[in-house]
Image: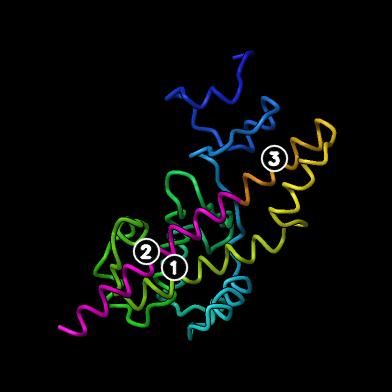
Amino acid sequence: MKNLGPQTLNSPNIDLSNDLFLLDYGFVVPLNPYDCIELKYDGALLDAASIATGIPSPNFSSPAPWQQQILFELNLEGEAPNLKVKLGGPELVEGRLLAALRVLFASDAETVQKHDLNTLKSLSAEAPLGIANEVAVLRTIVALCLIALDHFPTKVMEDESLLKQGVSASTELAIRFRVQKKSVIIDVMRDLGRRVKLLLSKDKATTQS
């Protein structure tokens, strides 16, 4: 393992994010399919994201008791919750975040309770609580991505300009790491944007028929 390099990703046994590649081996892997970003699950942040989408939404900071129970099962509520959720990587959207948003955008407990947690956590389970619910969820996640991008001190074009200027090896590594994280966020946004368009086109076709 001493001679690891970016080509290591070709090994089927290596499934590390760029955080671990950087910390353990001192390099980052471009287009790393296992790379992801971590966000904190936070009601105020979700409120801000939903406001940005323009979609009427619940108060994420004050869920109904039945919603709280599901959040507890997702370990997003309780005495020692795990509030770190991931975007990117093979899962694209961490199941706990996806399930939480689907539940919080739902107004009918009975409809939600028809589905098990695994279904609610699965992105491949297409719109289990309806198209309007799913569109609201995905647009909120896209808004979270935009908020995450805004927290970086530079834009991608600025990073590319810095790399062309010539910087120290450590600075170059830091910039490339930053660029890869932004790429993860942008890829998630593009994927979810495509899903939203597909859902809306299906909804339109259903309405017309």
Q: Quadrant of the N terminus?
A: top right
At horizontal 62% and vertical 44% (from top left) the residue drawn is 180
Inspect the image, locate mark 1, and give the three-letter code of the amino acid beneath it: Leu
Instruction: Return the residue found at the far right.
Output: 168
Residue 28 lies left or right of residue 197; in this view the side is right
Q: Which residue is mark 1?
A: 138
Displayed quadrant of residue 103: bottom left
Q: Could you tell me which residue is drawn at 31 percent across and 55 percent down?
A: 124
The label on residue 195 is 2
Report the span colored magenta.
Answer: 183-209
Q: Are marks 3 and 2 in contact (CB under 8 Å)?
A: no
Instruction: Give the mark, 3 or 2, whose residue is nearer the N terminus.
Output: 3
**Nearer-N-terminus badge (2/1):** 1
Instruction: Pinpoint residue 22: horizontal percent, then vertical percent.
Output: 68, 32
Q: Which residue is mark 3?
A: 176
Q: At numbered mark 3, what does the secondary structure look like: helix, strand or loop?
A: helix
Amino acid type, callout 2? Arg
Reading the chain from its start, which is encountered first: label 3 or label 1? 1
Magenta residue check for 189 = yes
Q: Residue furthest top?
A: 2
Q: How is the image coloured?
A: rainbow
Compared with residue 65, is residue 195 higher up or lower down, i.e. above or below? above
